Image (cartoon, rainbow, N blue to C red):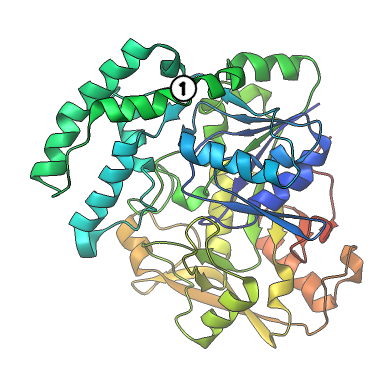
Amino acid sequence: MPAVVVVGAQWGDEGKGKATDQLGQDVDYVVKFNGGNNAGHTVVIDGETFAFHLLPAGVLTPGVTPVIGNGVVVDLEVLFAEIAEIESRGKDASRLRISASAHLIPSYNRIMDQATERYLGDRQLGTTGRGIGPTYADKMNRVGLRVQDLFDESILRQKVRSALEQKNGVLTKILGADAVDPDAVADDLLSYAERVRPMVIDCSLVLNDALDAGQTVLFEAGQATMLDIDHGTYPFVTSSSPTAGGACTGTGVGPTRIDSVVGVVKAYTTRVGEGPFPTELLDEMGDRLREEGGEYGVTTGRPRRCGWHDAVVTRYACRVNGLTDLVMTKLDVLTGHETIPVCVAYDVDGQRVEEMPLTQTGFHHARPVYEELPGWSEDITGVRRFEDLPVNAQKYVLRIEELARTRISAIGVGAGREATITRHSLIG
């Protein structure tokens, strides 16, 4: 049985939660391998909407073990608030497991994040202010706090004091914020220790044993390819690796164990936060896509920037992730357009470029080169077979597939779990 990685192929918000939830009907483990509660995904089941920020989508599926991998940064307050929310709605979260090596988001990193954005002013990166970046920075600086530290009080308190010796100086002398009490931080974190203890596992051992036993493991990325710290539109990126390679480093499962990599891509393009976005529509058409697509952040509520499908970005995502399949979401949102532009290349300072520009400066200067495709007016939300789509909708999908050089194996035509057209099996 396979190990399947699901990643976002644009700037996030592509509908990975729905794709993971659907695939999760046929798997044993769903593992979140990067990011934190700085992004969210929405799953609709039987007309009921669930919004997740930290929990893996598989937490809703009976029989599936949801896992938070070592590549994730965990805000314990958010984690237990999400657990309480779904349990209050009759869902069971008791199978949730967390890597002992996952890093914790202490309160001082939320303060650092927000104070730094205020300090940067017009130069801010547009973070969510949830402490994600500072926590990953602590990880790389080897001053981070891990889940396992909750079970050694003296070590935890020592690490918190050590971190705040430097951070309090930055907060008070540079960022104009108040100093943070290390004992209060440690007390808060330790208050969760016994609640967390039953969930903690050796993530690498558990998942590799599961694969050895013939079970199916689904790896779920937070954020998306164009927000990857290495491969995204740096510096307007997240602080982790939401590309397929992150599934290995974020869980302790080696690359030779991965059977397929599925990229999720919208029929159009959106992004949240700052940074270049070649196909962005700053007009009524952009507003129309935003309203008809419900393009507001699950975690922040921020309106998403909207534009036409960027096939250059999609093809790039296919390459850096080694995608075997694409899942296209929100095709139904494009219903009612007489023609639909697709970006097939860029004009960069007068030169046609069909792949991602080498430099960030080049990408910033990129202007879309569009190909106009005919639209359709028929309601497609009830369609469940590809051949039953309007001809022009079929042609749109096939053209995106051709440009991406990767097969589109499933197509979302509505918000619900069932509103999907399957062209090729993604598991097995």
In the rendered image, residue 50, in percent from the top left (x then y), is placed at: 67, 53
Q: Secondary structure at mark 1?
A: helix
Q: The residue under label 1 is which amino acid type?
A: Val
In the rendered image, residue 79, in percent from the top left (x then y), is placed at: 54, 37
- Residue occupying the point 81% across, 19% down: 214
Vertical side of 215 occupied by 270: above or below = below
Quick one: label 1, few (<14), some, or many (20+) residues within 10 Å? many
Vertical side of 199 occupied by 66: above or below = below
| Residue found at the far left of this picture | 173
- Residue occupying the point 46% across, 48% down: 38
- Left or right: 162 as drawn, with respect to 350: left
Look at the image and tell me in which quarter the C terminus lies. top right
- Residue occupying the point 91% across, 70% down: 388
- Left or right: 284 as drawn, with respect to 93: left
Look at the image and tell me in which quarter the N terminus lies. top right
- Residue occupying the point 58% across, 63% down: 311
